Image (tube, rainbow, N blue to C red):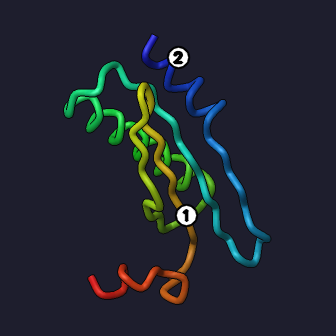
Amino acid sequence: MRILAGLVALGMATIVAVSPAWARVARTQTVVSLTDRSDPAVKQALREAFDTSLRGAVAMGFSRIRVDAIQVLQDTVVLATVATDGDDDDEAPENARDQ
């Protein structure tokens, strides 16, 4: 059942917007259901969402992925990521460059 829920979440809730081929950037949102709102359940859902996003980015041929946003809602976790295939230091947020 968990695998089916994961596949449904991946198929129905992953939104991919791909820029033109010369830009090679994909923005995705992955939604994973929460069994409860405990810390272990939220951490597991985040791991699952990140793994799903990472597998999707690798399957599309991207070499870099960064987390853009995380939302913990009542019964779901939403992970927004940006995947690229090159050095995009010019597009990195200002606070990320200082780290």
> Which residue shows up at 66% across the image and 45% down it?
15
Q: Secondary structure at mark 2?
A: helix
Residue displayed at 70% across by 76% down = 23
Amino acid tagged 1: Ala
Whether residue 13 is situated above or below residue 25 in the rendered picture: above
Q: Is residue 24 above or below residue 26?
A: below
Q: Secondary structure at mark 1?
A: strand
Among the two numbered marks 1 and 2 on one chain, the one whose residue lies closer to the N terminus: 2
- Give the CA separation, mark 1 to mark 2: 25 Å
- Horizontally, residue 82 falls left or right of residue 70, namely right
Q: Percent position (x, y) of residue 86?
A: 55, 78
Above/below status of 6 relative to 27: above
Which percent across, then down, holds residue 4?
52, 16
Relative side of 97 to 14, left or right: left
Q: Which image quarter: residue 14?
A: top right
**Mark 1 sits on what residue?**
83
Spot occupied by residue 40 in the image (x, y as percentages of width and height): 20, 31
Residue, far front: 74
Which quarter of the rendering shows the C terminus? bottom left
Q: Residue at x 45, y 56 (%)?
A: 69
* Residue at the disc numbered 2: 4
Residue in view at x 46 percent, y 32 percent: 32
| Residue placed most toward the observer, 46 or 61 | 46
Q: Residues within 10 Å of mark 2 (few under 14, many from 20)?
A: few
Q: Residues within 10 Å of mark 1 (few under 14, many from 20)?
A: many
Whether label 1 touches label 2, CB < 8 Å: no
Looking at numbered disc 2 in the image, what kind of residue is underneath it? Leu
